Image (cartoon, coloured by chain):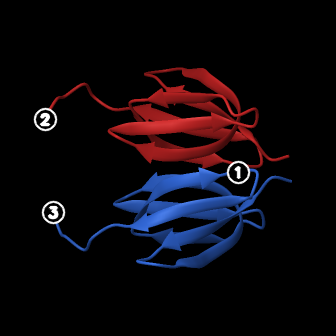
Chain colours: A blue, B red
Amino acid sequence: MCEANAYLLGDKSEILVMESVDHVSPEGDGLKLVDIFGEQKFLRAAIHSLSLVDHKVFLKQLDDRDG
Amino acid sequence: MCEANAYLLGDKSEILVMESVDHVSPEGDGLKLVDIFGEQKFLRAAIHSLSLVDHKVFLKQLDDRDG
């Protein structure tokens, strides 16, 4: 299984937001993450970068502007 | 190894742009893809979505605006 862990990139840190992520897709003004167990999480973030052999997905938070 | 294949999303199709992708990261106004053999490719695109258990990374082309 090639799921990955999703990290939110902070100033000088990476915060683990979800483990065993399978699907990541745009939803509304953010991203929907779904893990291999079907658990879902929504984040106001975008996909920043990937390091797949290391099983890592990096997300960056979107700033909190409204339309 | 948990590399993936990268597809560019078209209107009604997915075009395979690189196999065995390990790293995807922002570079300039696009993305740099690096496969497990160290080969690099640059695309004016953003990461759209991921389907990791299926080993798929979906990219969307950025429109060709300057400045």
Q: Mark 1 and mark 3: span between their CA atoms?
A: 33 Å
The answer to which image quadrant residue B3 occupies is: top right
| Relative height, residue A50 to residue B32 (above, below) | below
**Quadrant of the rendering where the C terminus of chain A is positioned:** bottom left
Q: Which residue is mark 1?
A: A52
Q: Mark 1 against mark 3, which lies toward the viewer?
A: 1
Q: Mark 3 and mark 2: span between their CA atoms?
A: 22 Å
SS at mark 1 in the image:
loop
Q: Is residue A55 left or right of residue A46?
A: right
| Relative height, residue B20 to residue A28 (above, below) | above
The amino acid at mark 2 is: Gly
Q: Which residue is mark 3?
A: A67
- Given residues B33 and A39, the one toward you in this image is B33
Quick check: marks 3 and 2 in contact, CB under 8 Å?
no
How many discs mark residues in the rendered view?
Answer: 3
Q: Which residue is mark 2?
A: B67
- Given residues B38 and B48, the one toward you in this image is B38
